[in-house]
Amino acid sequence: MRQRQSREATLQLECRVVAAQARLNSLCFRLRLCGFALHRFEASGVAELLAALESLEPPRVLDLRGPVMVAERGPIPGAVVTDLGRLMSSVADWPKDTPIVTLCACPEDVSSRAAAKKLLDAGYLSVRPLRGGFDAWAAAGEAVGTPVSPDAPSDAPS
């Protein structure tokens, strides 16, 4: 009986995911019809990013997962943590010719692509989303800092 209920719950969840994907595809199609260009970027892979980080002019990395997710899953060493709402203030003092790689934990790298578009529109010359985002970074076995426990004492004064 429990197996049957579990299977039914799984099927219901799969149906919801398919329906959400269909709505997203429909929205993208309507945006194209209205004249919005859905920018395609040449995304950077983890291996390519790692090589670039070792170069003489490494890119700056923008982690768009936001502070809560970074605290839960751990920070990427050297990355600047921000979100789309604070994006422009986070890069305000960066030279426009600085290479930037954006990453997020969204399906299809939605936030990192949106951030890349916004930065390119603002005049930054070299911005690329990381293909697969944080999950690709972690799956490649790359360094992630220690997650912060919500119960851990804060260093900030009260």
Image (cartoon, rainbow, N blue to C red):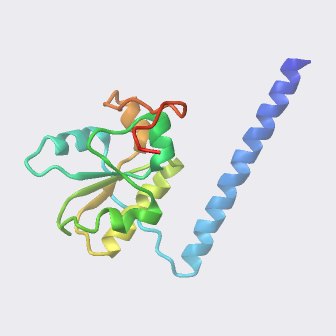
Q: Give the x, y percent position of residue 50.
A: 22, 39
Q: Residue furthest right?
A: 1
Asked if residue 109 is positioned above or below residue 95 in the image, the reply reads above
Quadrant of residue 53 in the image? Answer: top left
Q: Quadrant of the N terminus?
A: top right
Residue visible at 29% across and 38% down in the picture: 77
* Left or right placement of residue 158 versus residue 80 in this view: right
Marker count (numbered): 0
Asked if residue 20 is positioned above or below residue 30 in the image, the reply reads above
Q: Give the x, y percent position of residue 4.
A: 87, 23
Residue visible at 57% across and 81% down in the picture: 34
* Left or right placement of residue 65 versus residue 30 in this view: left
Residue visible at 32% across and 75% down in the picture: 122
Q: Nearer the viewer, residue 16 or 138?
A: 138
Residue 106 at least partly seen: yes
Q: Residue furthest bottom?
A: 35
* Left or right placement of residue 33 versus residue 130 in this view: right
Q: Give the x, y percent position of residue 147.
A: 44, 32
Q: Nearer the viewer, residue 68 or 36?
A: 68
Q: Residue furthest left?
A: 56
Residue visible at 35% across and 32% down in the picture: 144
Residue 40 at least partly seen: no
Asked if residue 110 is positioned above or below residue 157 in the image, the reply reads below
Quadrant of residue 155 in the image? Answer: top left
Quadrant of residue 141 in the image? Answer: top left
